[in-house]
Amino acid sequence: MRREIRFAGFGGQGIILAGLVTGRAAALHDGREAIVTQSYGPEARGGACSAQVVLDDAPIDYPMVTRPDVLVVMSQEAAQRYTADLADDCAVLIDRDLVELRPQPGWKLYAIPATALAERLGNRMAANVVMLGFFTAVTNLVSREAMEAAVRESVRERFIELNLRAFDAGYRYYREEAAS
């Protein structure tokens, strides 16, 4: 079944990497079809950027995201820019310390302090991987094992352990919040 995902934030947050890890996990480790596209603002860091991921069990006939089933937002600018074209019953995942959104009819809003959790792990740059753990637990679109393998393959060797802890923190945050 086709699923469209958009990761959005600003340059320097690892948004593109989050999309690439998700596509890699689905295609190489879960045996699904995946296409990842990306767009950047004119600035290298600080400008708007997004990664679009299309997942399917069958060959993908159109590679672009048109109405996301999942929107992951890590900046207020991205929230303002990308919340207009969402699918019905869209899951909207936000970094609650950086994004303020009111739930809209048809949305399922999920919030996590991704940047704060990454800071507690010692590196705020791991917030994108905290969000990937949260995304994995919330959506079940890609298996945890596949995402962890893709994280290992996608980050520099010296950052693997930090990123795996970040992934686990995001994953556990949803599991613990959902249980309570």
Image (cartoon, rainbow, N blue to C red):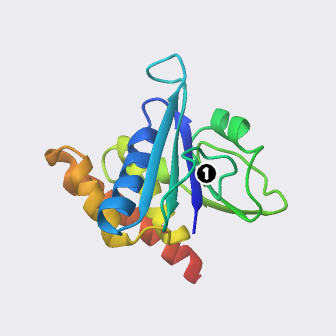
Image quarter where the N terminus lies is bottom right
Q: Work out which quarter of the rendered image holds the C terminus and state it.
A: bottom right
Taking the spot 45% from the left edge, 49% from the top edge, the residue there is 35
Whether residue 102 is situated above or below residue 91 in the rendered picture: above
Name of the residue lying farthest toward the right: 105
Q: Position of residue 108 (x, y in %)?
A: 71, 65
Is residue 119 visible in the rendered image? The answer is: no
Residue 54, image x and y in percent? Answer: 52, 53
**What residue is at 58 percent from the left and 63 percent from the top?**
2
Residue in front for this viewpoint, 61 or 10? 61
| Mark 1, secondary structure of its residue | loop
* Position of 135 relative to 53 (above/below): below
Image location of residue 91, percent across then percent down: 66, 62
Left or right of residue 82, residue 47 in this image: left
Q: Residue at the spot x=30%, y=47% of the render?
A: 122
Q: Give the left or right position of residue 157, taking residue 118 as reference.
A: left
Which residue sits furthest left? 157
| Nearest to the observer: residue 125 or residue 147 | 147
Quadrant of residue 165 within the rendered picture = bottom left
- Please name whichever residue, 118 or 163, is drawn nearer the observer in this view of the structure: 163
Q: Give the quarter of the image for residue 89.
A: bottom right
**Pointer 1 residue:** 96
Outermost bottom residue: 179
